[in-house]
Image (cartoon, rainbow, N blue to C red):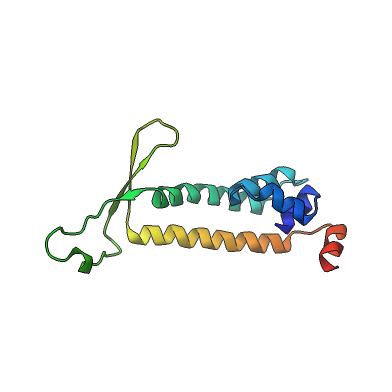
Amino acid sequence: MLVLASVLEVDLRKALILAKGLGVLAWLDMIKSYLIKPDLELNKIIAALQRLSGERNNIVHAYWQDSRPKSGLPSLVKSKPSDIATGLSISKKHTKLLLNHQYTPKEMRSIAAQIQELEQSLRLWEVSYKLPKKLAAALRA
C-alpha cells in the first residue's frame, strides 16, 4: 500500500480509501499505470498473477462434485493427489451457461503455492521500490 501511495503521490490514508474495495490485481494495475517508466519485473508478476487468479477463481467459485464411492462410508475414503475432481461454475462472460473444471488436488495445491510465491515476490518488489524522499520522511516521522 505504501508503494501505491507513493506512485499516486497521495498520503497513505487516501491510498487506502482509493484501494479499499479493489482486489490486489486492480491496485497492481493502478501502480503499473502510474509508474513513470515501465517496470519489467512488476509486469511479469502482474501477468502471472492474472493468469493464476483465473485458475484460482475456477477452483474457489466452482461447485465440486463428490466422486467418492457412494456405498459404505465415503467420508473415510481419502482422495489421492492424482484423483481428478470435477467442478461446475457459471460463465462470467455468458458464452456458455456452465463451465466444467477438472483439477487434481496436486494441481490445486500447486496453483495456491505459485500465487503465494508471486505475492512474496511482489512484497520484495515493494520493498525494493524507491520511495520519494518526501514520503520516506513522512513514514519515519
Question: Residue 64: percent from the left, percent from the top?
Answer: 31, 51
Up-down relation of residue 78 to residue 87 (above or below) = below
Question: Residue 61: percent from the left, percent from the top?
Answer: 41, 48
Question: Residue 120: percent from the left, percent from the top?
Answer: 59, 63
Q: 105 or 10: which is nearer to us?
A: 10
Q: Which residue is at a point 28% across and 61% down the rendered structure image?
A: 82
Q: Quadrant of residue 2?
A: bottom right
Q: Left or right? Give the position of 81 relative to 17.
A: left
Q: Quarter of the image for the C terminus: give it.
A: bottom right
Image label count: 0
Q: Quarter of the image for the N terminus: give it.
A: bottom right
Q: 46 or 24: which is nearer to us?
A: 24
Up-down relation of residue 8 to residue 110 (above or below) = above
Q: Left or right? Give the position of 94 relative to 40.
A: left
Residue at the limit of the structure toward the left, as seen here: 71
Q: Left or right? Give the position of 42 relative to 95.
A: right
Question: Residue 49: percent from the left, percent from the top?
Answer: 54, 51
Q: Which residue is at a point 21% across and 69% down the rendered structure image?
A: 76
Q: Which residue is at a point 62% across and 48% down the rendered structure image?
A: 21
Residue at the limit of the structure toward the top, as seen here: 95
Q: Quadrant of residue 67?
A: bottom left
Q: Quadrant of residue 133?
A: bottom right
